Amino acid sequence: MSSRPVLTLIAAVSADGFISTGQGVPWNLPRDKEHFRRTTRSQWLLLGRRTFEEMTGWFEDRHPLVLTHSPVYAPPVGEVVASVAEALQVAAAGGAAELFVCGGGEAYAAAMPCADRLILTHVSSTLGSGVPFPDVPPTEWRQTSREDFPADATHAQALSFATYERPRAAALPANCAL
């Protein structure tokens, strides 16, 4: 079997730690959309069923894996997986070097223990409640890059693109290996 793909969580997160109010993306940030599309182009994606359905039309040059507990769900593109471990196996068998987790909250929570890298868009606004992104303890993650953008005519909120790496020495759960 192929080696395990790098597992990367990619998300836009509010200043108070939420990815959504529970109904889709809560902000319109063209720079973030372009960053997401550029980063995930031609890549393998892991998405929860609801996020997959909200993103219909985004998959023409991507390989989506839909994380769901439903044994009868049949996505129009991509395939169904029942766990992060299965997604890693399917992506590895398909030759993927990296698997991007794109949401929602349950998919991020399930993948975080196995994650190698985080690509986060930090959005300056606060949501107050909603779907949280998992905690990112600074003792487990090292920021390796950051690019800041102020609010402007097309972006009501300031935002930053930041990449975090989990040191290779960090022990991952057994189900994270292939």
Image (tube, grey):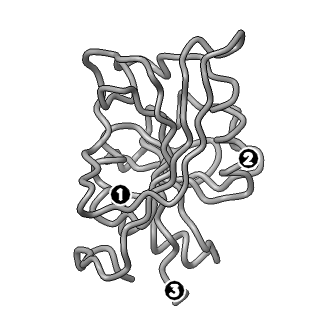
Three-letter amino acid code at the position of disc 1: Ala
User: Label 1's element?
Assistant: loop
What residue appears at the point 28 percent right and 32 percent down from the top-left corner? 132
Q: Give the CA separation, mark 1 to mark 3.
A: 20 Å
| Position above or below: 26 against 109 | above
Say which of 15 and 55 sits in front. Answer: 15
Q: Mark 3 points at which residue?
A: 3
Crowding at mark 1 (Cα within 10 Å: few <14, some 14-19, many 20+):
some
Q: Where is residue 87 in the image (x, y as percent from the top left)?
A: 45, 64
Which one is in front in this view, the residue at disc 3 or the one at disc 2?
2
Q: Which of marks 3 and 2 is nearer the N terminus?
A: 3
Going by the numbered disc 2, the residue's amino acid type is Arg
Tell me the amino acid under the disc marked 3.
Ser
Cα distance, mark 1 to mark 2? 27 Å
* Total residue callouts: 3
Q: Disc 2 designates what residue?
A: 38
| Residue 77 appears left or right of 6 | right
Q: Which of marks 1 and 2 is nearer the N terminus?
A: 2
Q: Which residue is label 1 attached to?
A: 82
Q: Quadrant of residue 2?
A: bottom right
Question: Could you tell which of marks 1 and 3 lies nearer the N-terminus?
Answer: 3
Residue 23 drawn at (x, y percent): 41, 17
Percent position of residue 107, x then y: 36, 47
**Image location of residue 17, percent across then percent down:** 31, 31
Q: In this view, does 144 lie above or below 95?
A: above
Secondary structure beneath label 2: helix
Closer to the camera in the image, 90 or 101: 101
